[in-house]
Amino acid sequence: MMTKFLSRNRHTVQRLGFSFITLMAVMTVLPIVGTIIYILFQGGSAISWDFITGFPHDGMRAGGILPAIIGTLYLTIGTAIFSVPLGIAAAIYLSEYAKDNQWTRLIRLAIINLAGIPSVVYGLFGLGLFVLFLKFGTSILAASLTLSIMTLPVIISTAEESLRAVPQAFRTVSISLGATRWQTIRKIVLKEALPGILTGVILGLERAAGETAPILFTGAAFFLPRLPQSPFDATMALPYHLFVISTQVPEMPIQIQYGTALVLLVFVLTMNLIATVIRSRARARRQW
Amino acid sequence: MTNKILIENLSLQYSDGTESLRGVSMGIRQNAVTVLFGPAGGGKSTLLRCLNRLNDLTEIKASAGRILIDEENILDAKTDVIALRRKVGMVFARPVPLPMSIRENVTYGLELAGEKRKSKLDEAVERSLKLSAVWDEVKDRLNDPAIALSGGQQQRVCLARVIALQPEIILLDEPTSGLDPISTGKVEAALLELKKEYTIILVPHSIQQAARTADYAAFFLQGELIEYGEGKSLFTVPKQKKTEDYIMGRFG
């Protein structure tokens, strides 16, 4: 009876199912669009030239957030300095040189597990290793190193994937024409994988830029009256500043909170946009 | 005519136990087309890949024997494989243009070898594209991506890429398997021209092609060299029963 009904109305059923799936797809877009609109609405009024370029004053209840912006920029660059070369080198090793044996399986297992560790644990680890044991103190250096460790698995796995996507035949042909393995990697493989690698790098750094927990004990300052002068100085940073003004400061004007959130969001989304542009351009130009 | 290559008792086994060679011995003549034919899995490609040590990239369980090129054992650990691969060029079954322009494809090997002079590179581009019979079709768009060419043109550019290095031996592993008859004819015509200067070893994609092109022919079956001789006699009056059966299409 039921099957008969369904089969007679199979077009209706299909249309229903299709609408349901479409609805689900749209619902995944809603949270991100909603968040952006809400933050834009709440914090848009706080954005001004002085807000971007000024120091906070009156116990952070007024003024700008320049030191936090600069701090996040420093931390992102610092993270890139350590994690990008290391991550790409590791990916090249895994994709181009490593044989499939116990040893490489162990490395892969380590990378997967590294990606699964909660960020606050990285923070504690960074405090123990960089701040205390290596005596870097609460500093941009210690925080960048901590963020680097957290970012590495993302960079390594996306870079390795991009390298592996380059057709094996290119390598064989290049070698058969008298290239060494390293020449082949440099002239063909890396060149073709670069857009994918860059995308992974940016996405990894973007996560690092938005993290609070790893820098909490390793480099973030509650308030500093001047910009950091060296890698051994502590720094203010957007995510931590947002946490501070949202929870630690009584009678905090809400526009400043949302304004700060908006700046952080723009920072991160801009990086995301750059990654998307790189990827789509490369895809259009790709010859395989 | 002299033997350019002397293969002595060559045996090889891949780690996954697939294709292998068993005790192959043969001499390969200079300035001639030697055809290696037989059913799939017979060891023809494996033999080719031994000659330029491309098998170094594959996991090999065991190998034995010697390959002498100009009386030097190239399987020796001390062999300069880079120099060997410049001397022994290879064209693959599927045309694989590198992701760059036609010109860059042809100059790739030369530039790796350290040639920087533009005049030399230009000269090599023209000479090798002419020899591989594709110059007229691509001379006006040398800076276009090589992937934009048709399959047949791509394969001839791949041949030119090998010729540009001025090798002494050219290995071709079913170079026309994906090409239409006209492109196939052009590649075969180029081979006839090339054998005046080079030693050519060809794995053909059909018995017809083997018979058309072979000065010498070697029949491989399951890793063993069954029969080897002049092309004309081997394809008309094969000495071995197995060779005859294969040529007549009774198996394979």
Image (cartoon, coloured by chain):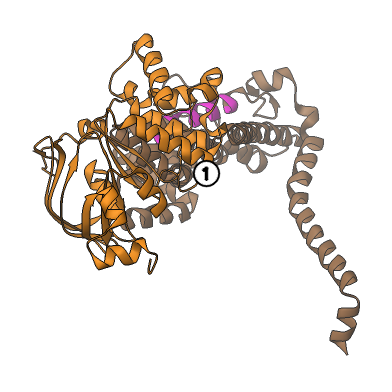
Residue at mark 1:
B181
Q: How many marks?
A: 1
Q: Which chain is orange?
A: B
Q: Chain of mark 1?
A: B
Residue at 33% x, 61% y is: B41
Q: Residue furthest bottom?
A: A1
Q: Indicate left or right for B200 with B125 as reference.
A: left
> Residue A75 in the image: x percent, y percent?
49, 31
Residue at 36% x, 49% y is: B210
Nearest the viewer among A23 and B127 is: B127
Crowding at mark 1 (Cα within 10 Å: few <14, some 14-19, many 20+): few
Give the quadrant of the N terminus of chain A. Answer: bottom right
What span is in magenta?
A68-84
Residue at 40% x, 28% y is: B160
Quarter residue B116 falls in:
top left
Q: Indicate left or right for B31 with B127 as reference.
A: left
Query: Tag 1, which secondary structure?
Result: helix
Task: Chain A: give its colour.
Answer: brown
> Residue B70 in the image: x percent, y percent?
12, 34
Quarter residue B200 falls in:
top left
